[in-house]
Amino acid sequence: MLQPGLIVCHTTAECLGAIDTPKSFAGDHQFLHLNCQVAGRFDGQVGNRALDYSQGDVTLGYSAGESFLIRHSHDFQNLTVMVSPDALYGLAGEEVEPLIGRERGEEADFFVRHAGQCRKTMRSAMSIANLMKDIPQHRLLLHAATLDFLHWHLSAFQTCRGCDVLSPRVCRQLDGAKELLLQDLSDPPTIAKLARAVGMNECKLKICFKKRFGTTIYALFQEERMKKAKRLLQDYNVTETAMLLGYSNVSHFSTAFLKQFGCLPSRVRQFAGAPTR
């Protein structure tokens, strides 16, 4: 607990113990739950509502006391900020009313809303998870990081147009497209190939991909490609790294790297203490 009405919780598969086998958990009626799934998969049932989320998904919910039947993967991790309605109003003001579907002081019914994926929320969640390992040394930093998480989490919903439009089936198709996209970072598949592989048309794939992952197909590929480049530069020179990642022109690789990280790949090689060429 960081302050009255504000609790942060990093939950792992070991904590819940529902790996591949459904397990029932009681809900509460005191807190809104602002979730970001840090890793793994999660599915469950509450009443007639099916839940199906994976890494990066941002959700907002209120249980009103209902029980949950859940199951998760062995690598499941979730970051939750539990905040009472009064505390949330105190921190964020009345602009949160549309998000929680009621005015201050009104009773709420069960709801779960899904904003897809938000990279800034994910980064904030991972920062909190890391800080929680060192409590109580970094308690003030943890409090500040939690407020940062609240901001990006709520922003994900404010920019979301028609939350929950992506069905569990579409989410699985998009996850499959992402996996195929990043399978070989030296040879990007065409959007047409991705669409055929997951059974979607190209237009829908592009629109839904950006909604779920918060970026375009090409931008995500390039970001992951440059991250791999940064790792490869610890062992290979600039030319070798460019070739390993499918670049026929080293200058094109250097330009892409500069755009991603703000420095040339030769600079990374210098820090690695090796020849740059």
Image (cartoon, rainbow, N blue to C red):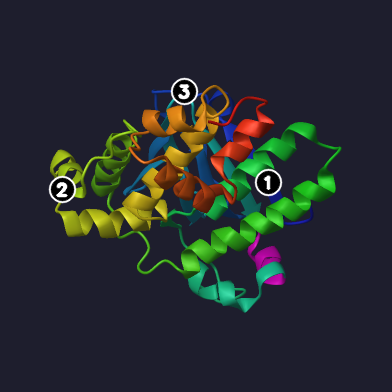
CB atoms of marks 2 and 3 within 8 Å: no
Residue in the picture at 71% in, 68% down: 91
Question: Depth-wise, is mark 2 or mark 1 nearer the camera?
Answer: 2
Query: Is residue 73 shown left or right of residue 139?
Result: left
The reply, left or right, for residue 98 in relation to residue 20 is right
Hey, which quadrant is residue 151 in on the image?
bottom right
- Name which residue lies at 47% across and 40% down: 226
**Residue at position x 76%, y 47% in the image:** 142
Q: In the image, what residue type sits under mark 1?
A: Val
Amino acid type indicated by mark 2: Ala
Up the image or down, 210 lies above or below 107; here it is: above
Judging by the rendered image, the residue that carries numbered circle 2 is 192
Range shown magenta: 84-90
Who is closer to the viewer here, 139 or 67? 139
131 shown above or below 145: above
User: What residue is at 35 percent from the left and 68 percent from the top?
Assistant: 162
Whole-number angstrom distance, CA of label 2 to CA of label 1: 42 Å
Measured as percent of width and height from the top left, residue 48 is found at 31, 49
